[in-house]
Image (cartoon, rainbow, N blue to C red):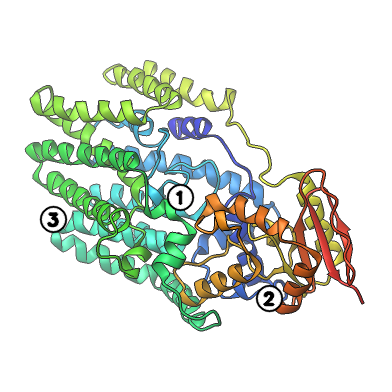
Amino acid sequence: MAFGLMAHALVGHVPFPFGDDFAYAPLAEYKANGALFARDDQLQMFANHALVYEWLYWLGQSGPGVEPVFRVAVIALAVVCAGAVMGALGGFGAPMLALPVVLALGVLGPLDGLGRGDFGGLIGAFFHHHNVALACVLLAVAAALGRRFVLAGLCLAGAAYAQPMTAIHGAWILGLGLLLAQPRATWTLACVALIAALPAVWIVGRGVLADAGGEGGEIDLITDAYRFRAPHHYDPPWGDIGVATLYLLAGWTGAALVARTDRWLGRFGVGLMLAFTVLHAVTLVVYKLGVAETSALFILDANRSTPLLFVLGPVIALAGIWRVGVGTASLGCGVVLAAIVGVNGSVAGAGMLAAGLVVMGLHRFEWGPRATAVGACLAVPLVFPPATLPPFVPAETRDVLAQIRAQTPQDALFVIPVGLSSFRHYAQRSAYVDFKLFSVAQPAQAALTRARIDQVLTPKPEHAEAIGWPAIALWDEDQRQAGTCEAMGAIMQATGAEYYVRAVAPGEVPPTCAGLVRPITGATLVVYEAAE
């Protein structure tokens, strides 16, 4: 608890709503009240897989508030993840007080995951269902190390209710580890996990099948969806790939050392690292080099589970060094860990590492000094709480969206800037299309989204090749400049939308249009509708 809270304090806090909240909060709202977003085809075709997110969101709406519930969940996840790492350390035979060293190496570095996994890391600053799934998989690994295979299966199934693809990664990683260490236990793990996860499979699968049809035509999912929406997930920098390779190397050298003293643990560690290596190879060969590209391998999101690699690699390495003792092999493993500190270290990580070394130095003492050290670490997040970032959406924009919610019909349809991801959450109205609700894993929904983006957006020639989230600011500016009276009227007529939301640049006077009126005018946005 002490070091989990300390890690949380060092990571910081981002309040709700932020990032993916602008997609999953409206999805949860629509599932609870079908009258909302009644004309939002893009949202209705999105098969929501984040069941845990829905449940916590509804819990917050029932009384406590979404932000307090998510805030408690973030703190709880930090403590649970720290406990799971401690359990993995103990399972591999390393001193559990090495926990802060692992947190410094694997959680608090500038890079906390690769590609799709570089989204808040294992201990995030904001609530995300992906972190719940990662925590469940990590708990499953710790349970398997304690030979509690039924519990491991239940934890693995829990990941399916948070993020199904992360659960599949966990099944591959943990399953291969057990297959090499104790093949019979793999059957227990698989049966328990499959039975416990069946409701999630049924709920999510039913949603995907229900949205199999729809308008939009055929697209190349790899080029026009995956690489178009998030190129950084599938083309990570070579430097980041090198950092992830170091964590793999740390895990492999540690597994080799562990195998010298315990064959079961050694085989288990080799299985874990073999699974991570295969996933890493998919990132390198398929995503980065573009060899043997298939939609199935992109749906896999092979680097999604790298936050687990970033903690389990150092766990196994530290266990190997501890079990073997001083020697040439352990020195080599230590060099790899030192290299990780050199290329992925941070000031926060240095603070955690120093605390870890102090506590490890007290390992052989009686409980008094150790309790004092742990109490001091527990006091850190109480004296220095995590810094809270300011709201993601400017107050002027939130004010306009609140006016839209109060002054327009609930079943109205809006054409909005494609980068205005906060529209649905604050305005509670249907949007024709935006970039956030782009479900690349659903061909029909992805095709609909691409077709509508191309319909409402005409990038400048110099921006025609821009893709992904870095292009959003460029596209929104192009859409603003293209928002002439004639263009807005034509788009509203073509889409059947009653309203057009146009961005306003600082100091700009919004155009006055014949045939269009401005019921709402704000500092950052202006709303147009057809005159009666």
Q: Residues within 10 Å of mark 1 (few under 14, many from 20)?
A: many
**Whole-Å distance between the Cαs marked 2 and 1?**
28 Å
Q: Residues within 10 Å of mark 2 (few under 14, many from 20)?
A: few
Q: Amino acid at mark 2?
A: Gly
Q: Is residue 90 visible?
A: no
Comes first in the chain, label 1 or label 3:
1
**Whole-Å distance between the Cαs marked 1 and 3?**
27 Å
Give the mark count. 3
* Picture coordinates of residue 519, whole percent (x, y): 89, 63
Comes first in the chain, label 2 or label 3:
2
Q: Residue at x 63, y 35 (%)?
A: 388
In front: 376, or 268?
Answer: 268
Q: Would you name the residue on which mark 1 appears?
A: 131
Q: Amino acid at mark 1?
A: Asn
Q: Amino acid at mark 3?
A: Leu
In front: 15, or 477?
Answer: 477
* Picture coordinates of residue 188, whole percent (x, y): 23, 64
Q: Would you name the residue on which mark 2 appears?
A: 34
Q: Would you name the residue on which mark 3 appears?
A: 180
Q: Is residue 279 visible?
A: yes
